[in-house]
Amino acid sequence: MIDASDKMTRLMTRRGFVIAGGAAAAMIAFRLRYEVESVAAKNSAPKDVKIVKFSDGGQRQDVATLPLVVKTEAEWRQQLSPIAFEVTRHAGTERAYSGEYWNLHDKGLYRCICCDTALFSSDTKFESGTGWPSFWQPIAKENVHEGGDLSLGMMRTAVSCRLCEAHLGHVFDDGPKPTGLRYCMNSVALRFVKSA
């Protein structure tokens, strides 16, 4: 015979299962909608983009209008290491404290590993304690794109290269002055050029 407490436990278990299942289905539907919108936005993106060019010494040069860099997955795989491919082309993340630039303190410029666009200067790099290279601003706002990312079930702001759409990392609002921002980047998405 089933007593009242067993019946209540079964009811709670079923109710919890239904609620959890409904929440999971809603999250999947929301993520699919976001991915469809992202693909549509990419397909409607302009074919030419404006970026600011910089010398390897960090001197600002001209604003250039260039065609968006588009390659096949096979071409990207040939150009990039497996981890750089996963991070830049599939929005992956390298493990904290595993990248070569998280603890680099040399003066220089950080360029996109995929297309060589100047992205960050060592002048704005700071020690965030996160295990990823962190900057309080990009070298030129025109050179990066910021967009919504719901991949972990919460809203974050993803940062990508404007010229080739390589995923670089995310930006958070817990950085130092003067911007209060923390551009938390993946080392494998960057190529460092040391100042002469």
Image (cartoon, rainbow, N blue to C red):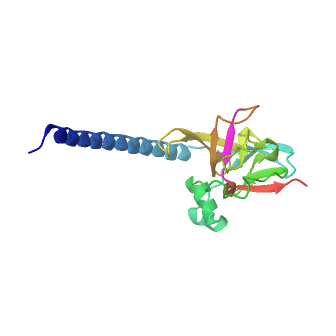
Q: Position of residue 49 (x, y in %)?
A: 68, 44
Residue at point 64% right, 40% down? 171
Say which quadrant the N terminus sits in: top left
Asked if residue 80 lies left or right of residue 108, the reply is left
- Give the image quarter of residue 181: top right
Residue at 50% across / 42% down in the picture?
Answer: 150
Residue 184 counted in the magenta span:
yes
Residue 177 in which image quadrant? top right
Instruction: List the single residue furthest toward the bottom.
Output: 78
On whether residue 44 falls in the magenta region, the answer is: no
Residue 107 is at least partly visible in this image = yes
Q: Is residue 158 left or right of residue 123?
A: left
Q: Please identify the residue farthest to the left as the structure is shown.
A: 1
- Position above or below: 48 against 83: above
Image coordinates of residue 54 in percent, x first then y, are 82, 47
Image spot of residue 134 (x, y percent): 71, 45
On the image, which quarter does residue 156 sit in?
Answer: top right
- Position of residue 145 measured from the top left corner of the image (x, y, whole percent): 65, 42
Q: Nearer the viewer, residue 64 or 137?
A: 137
Tally of marks: 0
Is any atom of residue 47 visible in this view?
A: no
Q: Which residues are magenta?
A: 180-186
Query: Which of 115 and 40 lies nearest the eye of the viewer?
Result: 115
- Give the position of the C terminus as an image quadrant: bottom right
